[in-house]
Image (tube, rainbow, N blue to C red):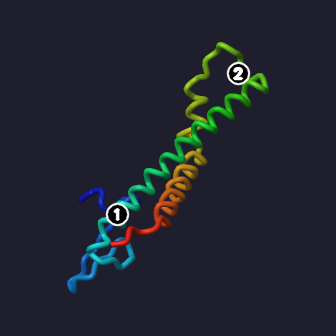
């Protein structure tokens, strides 16, 4: 499986003696599905936080550029400006990773359902 070694892969290990692990956390087979769902919910929460932050940064930066006179009304910004604020900026990826970690942490802190 070529994508099994990606950093965002959820690794499930089953030992010969029947022990289950999700990453390095020992789990029971009954809890495995709920833990995987929780981690995936956390990733989705992280992406949602990231998109909300991206919209906020875009609004603030456009307002800042208008306030300083860098952008004139009724003029378009070039793609190099958009590239510089997004995928060309290392902070873009740092923010994405941070939001995903926050989302996974928030989802992991939710109380587990009682059976």
User: Who's the residue at 50% across and 66% down the image?
Assistant: 109
Residue 83 placed where, x, y %?
A: 55, 33
Q: Is residue 108 left or right of residue 22?
A: right
Q: Position of residue 40 (x, y in %)?
A: 38, 57
Instruction: Look at mark 2 in the image and give the residue it sits on.
Output: 71
**Residue with the most extreme top position:** 74
Whichever of callouts 2 and 1 sits on the residue coming sooner in the sequence is 1
Mark-to-mark CA distance, 2 and 1: 46 Å
Figure check: 89 above or below 10: above
Furthest toward the front, the residue is 115
The crowding category of the residue bearing disc 2, from other C-alpha atoms within 10 Å (few below 14, some 14 to 19, many at least 20), is some
Which quadrant of the structure image shows residue 1?
bottom left
What residue is rendered at 33% in x and 77% in y?
A: 27
Q: Is residue 62 above or below residue 24?
A: above
Which residue is disc 1 drawn over? Answer: 36
Horizontally, residue 52 falls left or right of residue 35, namely right
Residue for point 30% across, 61% down: 4
């Amino acid at each position: 499986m070529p994508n099994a070694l990606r950093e965002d892969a959820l690794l499930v290990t089953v030992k010969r003696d029947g022990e289950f692990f999700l990453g390095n956390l020992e789990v029971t087979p009954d809890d495995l599905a709920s833990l995987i769902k929780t981690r995936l919910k956390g990733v989705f929460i992280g992406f949602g936080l990231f998109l909300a932050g991206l919209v906020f940064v875009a609004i603030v930066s456009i307002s800042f550029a208008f306030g300083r006179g860098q952008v004139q009304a009724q003029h378009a910004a070039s793609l190099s400006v958009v590239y510089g604020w997004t995928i060309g900026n290392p902070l873009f990826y740092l923010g994405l990773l941070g939001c995903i970690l926050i989302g996974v942490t928030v989802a992991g802190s939710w109380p587990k359902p009682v059976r």
